[in-house]
Amino acid sequence: MPARIADMAPRLVPVPGVRAVSLVGSRVRGTHRPDSDRDPGVCCHGVPDVAALIAPASEVRGAPAAVAGPGGWGPWEAAWEAEFLVEGARKSSSVGDTLHVALCLSRAFGILAQSLHAHHRVWCLNEKGAPAVAAALPDAPRTSPHESVR
């Protein structure tokens, strides 16, 4: 187990509700790259004290850490997921994984289009044409003068 996760486990286990801490994700599967992150999995009984998880996670990270409750990524999920997908596409493009790049960017655009619709309380029932409709909504990002939107 990587040092950071091994260091984190004894700090997290005493938190009420936490039963175990393990490494999950690509490093466990053996499919990680040198720039892959380390994902701790926190196994809980009942609902853990999420606020009590923030301090040890921030201490190990060396910066403020965001911790979400069971089954969630928190209220920032859509924006964070889109950013995460774009970063994943960037990493995959460096190794020529064009399918993963296309899927990540497609999902990111879908999330952002849905988020703009939700922000304006407008239904987006179909992804077909959603970017053009989202671009017409108030507060939608505008292109720079040297770019065009089709």
Image (tube, rainbow, N blue to C red):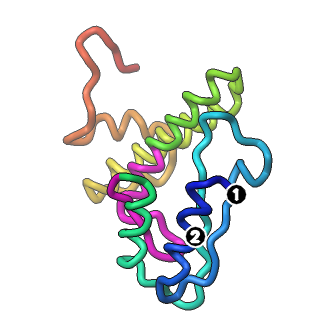
* Residue type at the position of mark 1: Met
Determine the CA span between mark 1 and mark 2.
10 Å
> Which residue: 41% across, 36% down?
131
Residue 107 image offset from top left, x and y in percent: 55, 43
Residue 115 located left or right of residue 44 = left
Residue 3: say if magenta.
Answer: no
Q: Nearer the viewer, residue 4 or 150?
A: 4
- Whether the residues at callouts 1 and 2 have beta carbons within 8 Å, the answer is yes
* Residue type at the position of mark 2: Ala
Kindly report the secondary structure that dominates the magenta region of the rendered protein: loop
Residue 91 located left or right of residue 28 = left
Residue annotated with mark 2:
9
> Which residue: 20% across, 41% down?
138
Residue annotated with mark 1:
1
Bounds of the magenta segment: 63-82
Residue 70: say if magenta.
Answer: yes
